[in-house]
Image (tube, rainbow, N blue to C red):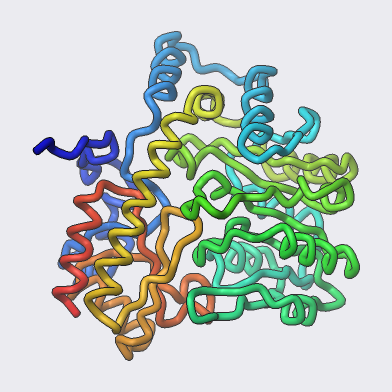
Amino acid sequence: MSLPVKSIFDEVINRSKTNSMKWAHADQLLQASEAKANPLPMWVADMDFRAPQAVIEALHGAVEEGIFGYPGGATESYQKAVINWQAKRFNWKVEADWLVHTPGIITSLKVIAQAFSAQGDSILIQPPVYAHFHDDMLMNGRRLALAPLTRTETGYGFDPDIFEQAIQPNTKLFIMSNPHNPTGNVWTEAELRTMGDICERHGVLVVADEIHQDLIMNPLKKHIPFASLGEGYARNSITCTAPSKTFNLPGLQSANVMIPNPRLRAEFIRQYERNMFPLVNTLGMVAAEAAYTHGEPWLEELLEYLRGNHSYFADAINSATDKIKVLPADSLYLSWMDCRGMEMSAPELEHFMLTKARLWLDKGQKFGLEGHGYMRINLGCPRSTVEEAVQRLLSAI
């Protein structure tokens, strides 16, 4: 009998001695009693896998040159790599002059809020949703217009009436999570068009955060870039992408903002330059170009591995207990768990996970009020880590 073929993603890499936010700072980010339990870090969206070998080799080449002066911006070959990736993966024709290179999507969202809204204006979001969509908007003096997703038997749905009714006279932006984090919803063309048409009617600019675009778990679903729907949708939108989630490069801080409308692009750049010196990490550019040029085979292998992790985790938990329901995941290497059957308050549930299950997960309330009673777990890790998480969780329950 032959042994199963080992995957490159099975390798367990000890990150506890590195300056990893995820692994090395429990004493700073958790209460003393929680850190003492030594919970297994499965929270922030940072995978425990090495980047593609082509990326590592490209970085070695850049480092060997030994000079780290000011970069001259995105090169023609860099732009070509980004444009070709969008065309090949999503059939989206991006023009080179649409691209604005930034240090990251979170930075870009703050710039967008400042450029296209004023203090006191409202920003439309769809909770439960990525924490920076609400936290950073409030930090910048904006209000929130909430259009919650509708909880269904198997996950979440988009209700156009709820969406449109949430728009206020002072709503200037809609920050779309496409695919949606943390629910994993992969929006259909009809849903995207409906959102876009409603925003157009009300004069609301669509900001599409598509950082998870490459991480589709359900082979029957496909990611559709919002701006690819047609000229009208492109003209009223800003799309944010990055290689950081796809290829595990967040520490190198390189992102791409696509802005087809020249007026919007000029205003974005003006606000960007008001806020900071508009240069991006040289090594981040090297890594991104190598990833988009040579990283597709690595990504395809990763997707198969992540699908296996999702399937294993959901089957193991859902078959063993009715107190926690792992919801189906159409995208992301993150899994959204309904823990309301534990009958705990949100703080009690978080404390239970950290000290009893000894799992460091993302608490559901981080994603808004609609996240109370839920937890998000990061499955971007070796299968053995997922197996350990299952054992800890079921033993605690």
Residue 138 placement (x, y as % from top left)? 64, 69
Q: Residue at x 46, y 76 (%)?
A: 365
Residue at the bottom extreme of this rendering: 343
**Up-down relation of residue 77 to residue 319 (above or below):** above
Left or right, 250 with respect to 211, comes to left
Quarter occupied by residue 327: bottom left
Q: Residue at x 75, y 34 (%)?
A: 94
Q: Nearer the viewer, residue 146 or 83?
A: 83
Left or right, 224 with respect to 58, comes to right
**Up-down relation of residue 193 to residue 66 (above or below):** below
Residue 42 placement (x, y as % from top left)? 31, 58
Quarter occupied by residue 103: top right
Q: Residue at x 44, y 29 (%)?
A: 297
Quarter occupied by residue 242: top right
Quarter of the figure with the C terminus: bottom left
Quarter of the figure with the N terminus: top left
**Residue 269 visible in this rendered orientation of the protein:** yes
Q: Residue at x 60, y 47 (%)?
A: 105
Residue 171 placement (x, y as % from top left)? 81, 71
